[in-house]
Amino acid sequence: MAEVAEQTKKAAKGSVVISAERCKGCGFCVEFCPPEVLELASEYNSKGYHTPILVKRELCTGCDICGMVCPDFAIYGYIMKKKSKEA
Amino acid sequence: MPEELYEIEANIPANPIEEYLRMDRMPHIWCPGCGIGTTVNCFVRALQTSGLDLDKVAVVSGIGCTGRVAGYMNLDSFHTTHGRAIPFATGLKLANPELKVVVYSGDGDLTAIGGNHFIHAARRNMDITVILINNMIYGMTGGQVAPTTPVGATASTTPHGNFEETFNLPFLAESCGAVYVARWTAHHVRHLTKSIKEALAKKGFSFIEILAPCPTLYSRRNKLGDGLDQMEFYRDHSQIKNGADTKSVAIDFQGDIVVGKFVDKERPTYLEAMNNHYQKKYGDRYVPSEEMRKVFHA
Ligand SMILES: Cc1ncc(C[n+]2csc(CCOP(=O)(O)OP(=O)(O)O)c2C)c(N)n1
Ligand code: SF4
Ligand code: SF4
Ligand code: SF4
Ligand SMILES: [Mg+2]
């Protein structure tokens, strides 16, 4: 169920994991993300809610404000580890 | 979903909140845009950094939409009857002084039917943390007027507007003797998390009021939009005034909201006062229980 945004070539510091099926489309994450990384998709999840997508992924800092405001535990941000150092 | 925008990736951290929730109970009952879940995020993040032994943390709720929190937390928790979270928490603390007891409940539950318990727990400086979600009405039962409904706001039982004086909860808590008093809104996630962490570390009666949207029964009836509109209102109309005189922080219908930490002081807790008193009165003849000795090294 957890989907993660593809990492960009430009060095984003962070990313988010979105559990789209838990989302109720309230828009809190979109509105309160400091660098305005997210938007609500025009598509729906299976319950009929518009869920967030990353539109400016290179700006994501992994600050997790989205994770703190989300009342449905459907998104959270994390700071990415450097890819090259990983197996 | 627009699949092309996503890529499944191994090696990403798990949602930090999941181990703190009873995931078998998800999805929760809260409406889209309800602020209660937002406050739970802050509570969990405060717990994560609190250094508390989670086996010694208990969460107690009364009845209501907020009252569901106890049942969703993956901690020792108890969902009590309406208004009785504080007396249950008091018993828990007295029988197990080692526990960190947190009451998490609604404005109606804690200040209407449970109002008497609230004032006496604060008066006694009972060593518990009370987190009160103020959505300004009785949510679960249909949006009835509460002691926290602002004058002029409409509730299902006040279709022509509320004319009863509204509780100023930080003032109430301070007047009764609470040693830690703060107010935040669901918009202030960082401040709130820090404040919950402070309250958890505080000995004695600590109290945090959190204003949170109830889009379904409060905002809609008052033509205030949805949960997001209410969150934006909090963002645009809150003033942070740490140390403000609690007399000055009453809430008016759609007026500016004073938030911050208002009280942070020391006085003996109920159990400290009891121990001191009996030690003074009876000296060596006073033999505290083993549980009590663990905490007070008496
Ligand atoms: C003794 C008793 N009286 C009345 C009720 C009905 N009741 C259930 S929840 C509730 C009010 C809850 O309001 P609040 O504490 O503000 O919680 P919210 O739903 O707004 O989070 C009431 C009156 C009850 N369950 N038990
Ligand atoms: S982690 Fe921070 S920057 Fe990234 S989407 Fe969430 S709120 Fe925005
Ligand atoms: S805050 Fe959560 S529920 Fe609301 S739109 Fe974002 S992911 Fe969905
Ligand atoms: S009725 Fe109000 S308080 Fe209850 S879950 Fe819905 S929005 Fe939240
Ligand atoms: Mg309420």
Image: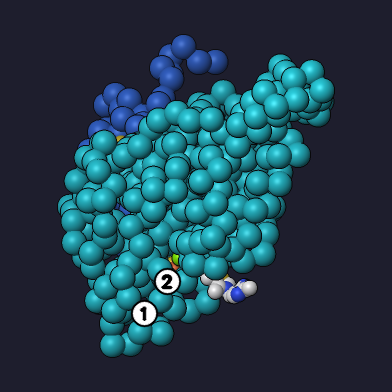
Chain colours: A blue, B cyan
Residue nearer the viewer, B137 or B206:
B206
Q: Which amino acid does label 2 sit on?
A: Ala
Res B243 seen here:
yes
Q: Which amino acid does label 1 sit on?
A: Ala
- Give the vertical position of B216 relative to B265 (above or below): below
Residue B207 quadrant: top left
Q: Badge 1 is on which residue?
A: B155
CA–CA distance in space, label 2 to label 1: 9 Å
Dot label at residue A11 = none
Q: Where is residue A43 in the image (x, y as percent from the top left)?
A: 37, 63
Taking the image as shown, residue B242 lies to the left or right of residue B204, namely: left
Residue nearer the viewer, B231 or B161:
B161
Judged from the image, the secondary structure of the residue bearing numbered disc 1 is: loop
Instruction: Say if disc 2 is inside 8 Å of ligand 1.
Output: yes
User: Are circles 2 and 1 on residues that touch, CB within 8 Å?
Assistant: yes
- Give the vertical position of B78 relative to B200 (above or below): below
Judged from the image, the secondary structure of the residue bearing numbered disc 2 is: loop
Q: Position of residue B290 (x, y in %)?
A: 81, 25
Residue nearer the viewer, B36 or B101:
B101
Give the chain of mark 2. B
Q: Badge 2 is on which residue?
A: B146
Residue at horizontal 56 percent and vertical 23 percent from the top: B51
Residue at horizontal 40 percent and vertical 26 percent from the top: A79
Sequence-first tag of 2 and 1: 2
Q: Where is residue B251 in the image (x, y as percent from the top left)?
A: 26, 60
Taking the image as shown, residue B57 lies to the left or right of residue B168, namely: right
Residue at horizontal 18 percent and vertical 61 percent from the top: B255
Give the chain of mark 1. B
- Give the vertical position of B217 relative to B77 (above or below): below
